[in-house]
Amino acid sequence: MGAKQIYILKFRLPLFFIVSLLFFFQVKADDKDLFELYLEALQNDPVLSSERYQNEAVKELINQGRSLFLPSVSALANYDDRNQARKFLNTDSSLSNSSSLFTRGTKADYDAYGYSVVIRQPLFNYSAYSTYKQILAQTSLSDKKFHLVQQDLMMRISELYFDALLAKDKVELIQSQRLAIQEQLKEAETKFNAGLISITDINEAKTKNDLMEVDLLNAVKDLKIKKREIQSITGNLPGRLKPLMSSIAFEKMDNLAEEWIDIALQNSTAILIKDAEVEIAKKEIDVRKGEHYPTIDALASRRRTWDKDGYAFGLRSYSDTIGVEVNIPIFSGGLTSSKVREAQLLKDKTVQESEAIRRQVELQVREAYLNLQTNLSEIEAYQQALKSSELQLKSTEIGFREGLRNSVEVLNAQQMLFSAKYDLLASRYNYLRNLLNLKHTVGTLSIQDIEEINKYLVINQNNES
């Protein structure tokens, strides 16, 4: 018997060391709750940061759009080294031999330079006005996309938090089950030594204990992976995560599915984004129609040129201009009309996409609502299954002690109890996940929802291993 007990201890030491090492590093870090991790994610999530920069870049388009209505100033300066030659085609020799300054000489090598300044102020440009209105719609679209990414971040960090808690619960449940199997193995050994049971009961318990070691290793690995996934969002590896209170009572929602759908049609970020895209497509039609209309600009310019020398006397030129310039497009080969038709067709395409999004959101709301209602029924069913499993295990253990049951039946009862506990925990996390998903789908998910769930997390974990 002593040799068998030593065999069990040898089996336990390596795995105990691994699990202890995992929780040693967890204890060194501060406990983290969902709200704290979300605040870290707001600062460090690269996906959110990328969308934030995109949003700021789009807002710069407003300044670019305003520039279309403001005056523009351009200046030009030039310097030329000119080398010219000319030939008289008149055959009158008296003219070619004339001493006149205007006809004398056939070559000139001189410098020329000058500058010009032009100020242009748009007075009427329908295309520019439509472009500016389109930019405002693009800015609104960017704000909505940024808001969607923020909501996505709430879902991502919440789902990972619940997944990590479930992985941690699985580690603890397997440890508890493993201890129960070892106790069962000890009791089976005692009965075997007394000649009350066969070696088969011993082998079954040992096999189950070996399998539990593998399950525990995989559960620890899954927990580590979940925490690394959280680190990929927050930038920091979390320590211990505050668990969900076991005393939470989940209640059925008063709102009907149709009420949630009505909220979604008004607030869904996905629908609002597509509506903004429709508005941008409409503005694009106006932009292209603007190419049919004339443009009117006020114009003021000053030009100065100097020819240092040249034929005869050189040249100085001064020019000051103030006026209005009207540019009237007449015919462009049908290009503008074709662009307008193209924009109209693209707008119709976006409208159909918007309708598809509305139907998809309605379907997603119904699905999330049904999942939530199903979760409530699952929680009640698993609670009842847990009670039944506890009674089943107790009766089976009593039967084993009295010789009416064997080890296999006890081990199966233990496995049923473990599965019932795990399923109950998973259903609780799934309820919270589906609740957040429903609010995310209808577009009402906010930081207040994270804070509300955070209230139901255990503050002190003195009993946590």
Image (tube, grey):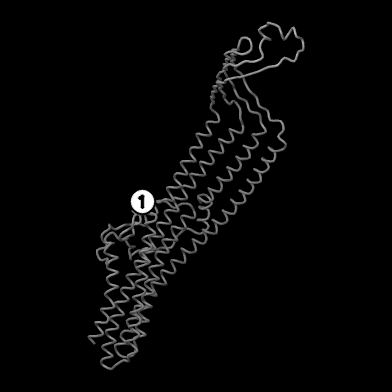
- In what quadrant of the picture does the N terminus appear? bottom left
Apparent side of residue 205 relative to residue 147 in the rendered image (left or right): left
Residue 351: % across, % down: 61, 48
In the image, residue 311 sits, relative to residue 72, either above or below, namely above
Q: Quadrant of residue 379?
A: bottom left
Depth check, front residue: 292 or 303: 303
What kind of residue is marked 1?
Answer: Leu
In the image, residue 258 sits, relative to residue 19, either above or below, namely above
Q: Residue furthest right?
A: 91
In the image, residue 351 sits, relative to residue 389, either above or below, namely above
At x 70%, y 6%, the residue is 98
Residue 78: % across, % down: 55, 21
- In what quadrant of the picture does the C terminus appear? bottom left
Residue 94: % across, % down: 74, 7
At x 68%, y 30%, the residue is 329
At x 49%, y 47%, the residue is 145
Depth check, front residue: 247 or 303: 303
At x 47%, y 50%, the residue is 148
Q: Residue furthest bottom?
A: 195
Depth check, front residue: 139 or 99: 99
Tally of numbered discs:
1
Residue 88: % across, % down: 72, 14
Name the residue beneath numbered marker 1.
Answer: 39
Apparent side of residue 337 relative to residue 203 in the rendered image (left or right): right
Secondary element under disc 1, as helix, strand or loop, is helix
- Neighbor class of circle 1 (other Cα within 10 Å; few <14, some 14-19, many 20+) is some
Q: Quadrant of residue 129?
A: top right
In the image, residue 372 sits, relative to residue 208, either above or below, namely above
Q: Residue furthest left?
A: 2
